[in-house]
């Protein structure tokens, strides 16, 4: 067990390292636009960790994950299951905004992934809900490289894997942004996400 003070200290160290990450191809874009990196926020002791893809414009302007349109849909899910945002930990695979919300490149994912790996080892969640295909692709190759499914097949499936600190569950969810104009997908997102309740 790591104390919450120690966890906070270790997470702050990650924040400082990312702030100084001049080798990132996204660093220049960040500083030119006066953007912030989005490190993650919430309870470092939570059983539940939610991992998105990369910050959008609202997130880069504030330094907070999921505070724009996709975040509103994530908040609706959390409301439905009476889960307080402050009780969980929310972060992304890539910590800086890619220009014009383009997909993150494999090089960007590779560069930022060690920070995410450290966040997982510090927080030690019992369940990791991934949002969208980039997040599940990274997390599943890390914990279960032989797993081979698409998000459209695997969404809502509770996948048991071994983390460095014990058995955990991975719950792949659609990205809330994909559900903005698709009511049917939004219902699927809510139904799948309800499974998080069990890990409170
Ligand atoms: N989309 C993401 O994947 N992450 C955010 O923080 C916001 C939008």
Image (cartoon, helix red, strand yellow):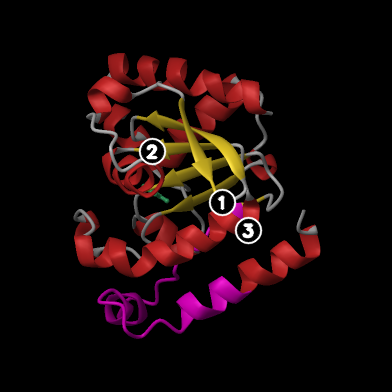
Q: Is residue 37 above or below residue 194?
A: below
Residue on which the image places disc 2: 131
Residue on which the image places disc 1: 164
Residue 38 appears in view: no
Nearer to me, 129 or 65: 129
Q: Residue 149 carries which label?
A: none
Please, what secondary structure does the residue beneath circle 3 have? helix
Left or right: 100, with 186 as reference point: left
Q: Which mark is residue 122?
A: 3
Q: Residue at x 25, y 21 (%)?
A: 153
Spatial distance from mark 1 to mark 3, Cα to Cα? 11 Å
**Are the two marked residues, 3 and 2, in contact with CB atoms closer than 8 angstroms?**
no
Residue 147 appears in view: yes
Q: Is residue 126 above or below residue 29?
A: above
Nearer to me, 100 or 165: 165
Label 1 packing within 10 angstroms: few (<14), some (14-19), many (20+) = few
Magenta run includes residue 46: no
Magenta run includes residue 38: yes
Q: Where does residue 103 sit, x and y in percent of width and height?
A: 20, 53
Please, what secondary structure does the residue beneath circle 2 have? strand
Q: Which residue is drawn at 69% across and 28% down?
A: 200
Q: Where does residue 187 sit, x and y in percent of width and height?
A: 38, 15
Q: Where does residue 123 sit, x and y in percent of width and height?
A: 64, 53
């Amino acid at each position: 067990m790591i104390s919450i003070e120690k966890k906070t200290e270790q997470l702050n160290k990650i924040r400082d390292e990312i702030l100084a990450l001049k080798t990132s191809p996204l660093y220049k874009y960040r500083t030119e636009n006066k953007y912030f990196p989005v490190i993650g926020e919430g309870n470092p002791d939570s059983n539940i960790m939610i991992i998105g893809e990369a910050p959008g414009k609202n997130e880069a302007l504030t330094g907070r994950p999921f505070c724009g349109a996709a975040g509103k849909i994530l908040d609706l899910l959390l409301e439905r299951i009476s889960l307080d945002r402050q009780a969980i930990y929310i972060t992304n695979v890539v910590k800086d905004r890619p220009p014009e919300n383009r997909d993150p490149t494999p090089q960007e994912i590779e560069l930022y992934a060690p920070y995410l790996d450290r966040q997982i080892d510090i927080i030690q969640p019992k369940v990791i809900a991934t949002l969208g295909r980039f997040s599940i692709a990274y997390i599943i190759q890390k914990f279960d490289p032989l797993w081979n499914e698409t998000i459209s097949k695997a969404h809502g499936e509770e996948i048991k894997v071994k983390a460095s600190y014990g058995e955990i569950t991975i719950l792949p969810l659609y990205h809330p942004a994909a559900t903005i104009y698709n009511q049917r997908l939004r219902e699927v997102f809510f139904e799948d996400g309800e499974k998080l309740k069990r890990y409170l």
